[in-house]
Image: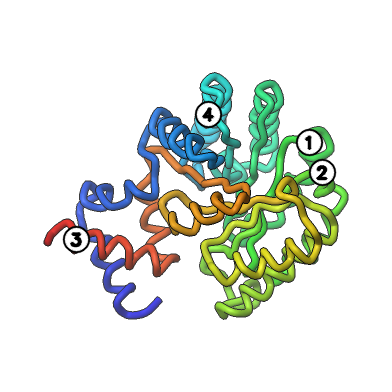
Amino acid sequence: MNLLNLLIVKLAQILPKSFIKLFASRYIAGEYLSDGVRVVKELNSKQILATMDVLGEDTTQISEATESTNEAIDVLKKIANEKLGSTLSVKLTQLGLKLSYDICLKNMKLILDVAKETDNYVEIDMEDSSCTYDTVRLYKELRRSYSNCGMVMQAYLRDGENIFKGALKELSGSSVRLCKGIYNEKEEIAYKGKQEIRDNFIQLLDFLFQNNIYVGIATHDLYLVNSSKQLIKKYNKSFKEFEFQMLLGVKVDLRDQLVEEGYKVRIYVPFGTQWYKYSMRRMKENPDLVKNIALNIFAKRS
């Protein structure tokens, strides 16, 4: 992150939460499930799909993990009742992964049971490297009994392709959301250079396409979008075999262009009371987001 972006993030950390909330609203649906439903309906009206996420991670008590599980179940029921074009995304540390593997597994099964009842699908987010292998282990265990869940892979992880090779059986008939990754990891774990992350992203996408695995190509990087299109053409993939995924409020023009070209596009729609922590993390890890917020601030004040 350059000096200007760093200064803006430092400034944001001392500003009132109400001030940050004003400018984070573009990237977060709101605090309540009703806010998420409203945004998803707007996206669906534009032929855009969604995946809803109740913000939160790193629960410290079993009661919090239980509450997060119930919130996820409420989202699935609401999606069904409102007939929304949306899946559900969950973070395993929100469901108790760092408290107990077995508790998290139990909570995920409760969620997947409701997803099955409501004919829906759950995408298991990938978090920092301390969770990577437990996340993959839990995903593989769930896939023995559930067909309605997929996993995420971060292209900056050096071990990404090996993880895929070790889970090929479970990945068959499942899906992968492939993204760059946003957590600050050690160099021995993750690629650091912009282009080497891009190169590994395309290498992993090529591997997934070769093995006929459904991919959510999650990027706002035009270079990666165009490179992905080349692979789509190379493997003669139909629009039913992959989709593009993006964050709410980011690169809207690119999103709309992809929809106009006929591609399936899914938007990650976060909501919840923990919007501040999410906003600050996104600002620290995404320099473009920092710049956009800064421009919004100056525009509002002028």
User: x and y percent of residue 182 in the render?
Assistant: 52, 63
Could you say which disc has been placed on residue 147 in the image?
1
Along the polypeptide, which appears first: circle 4 or circle 3?
4
Look at the numbered discs 2 and 4 and tell me whether their residues touch, using CB distance below 8 Å.
no
Q: Amino acid at mark 1?
A: Ser
Q: Amino acid at mark 3?
A: Ala
CA distance separating discs 2 and 3: 47 Å
In the image, residue 269 sits, relative to residue 159, either above or below, namely above
Q: Is residue 107 left or right of residue 144?
A: left
Of callouts 2 and 4, which one flags the residue occurring earlier in the amino acid sequence? 4
Q: Nearer the viewer, mark 1 or mark 2?
A: 2
Q: Earlier in the sequence, mark 1 or mark 2?
A: 1
Q: Residue at x 56, y 40 (%)?
A: 49
- Res 173 label: 2
Q: Earlier in the sequence, mark 1 or mark 4?
A: 4
Q: CA distance from mark 1 to mark 4?
A: 19 Å
Label 4 sits on residue: 75
Quadrant into which the C terminus falls: bottom left
Residue drawn where x is 75% and y is 63% of the image: 233
Q: How far apart are labels 2 and 4 at the CA level?
A: 24 Å
Image quadrant occupied by the N terminus? bottom left
Of label 1 and label 3, which has the lower sequence position?
Answer: 1
Number of callouts: 4
* Residue type (three-letter) at the residue carrying disc 2: Gly
Gap between marks 1 and 3, in whole Å? Answer: 48 Å
Q: Kindly report which numbered mark, 2 or 4, lies closer to the viewer in this rendering.
A: 2
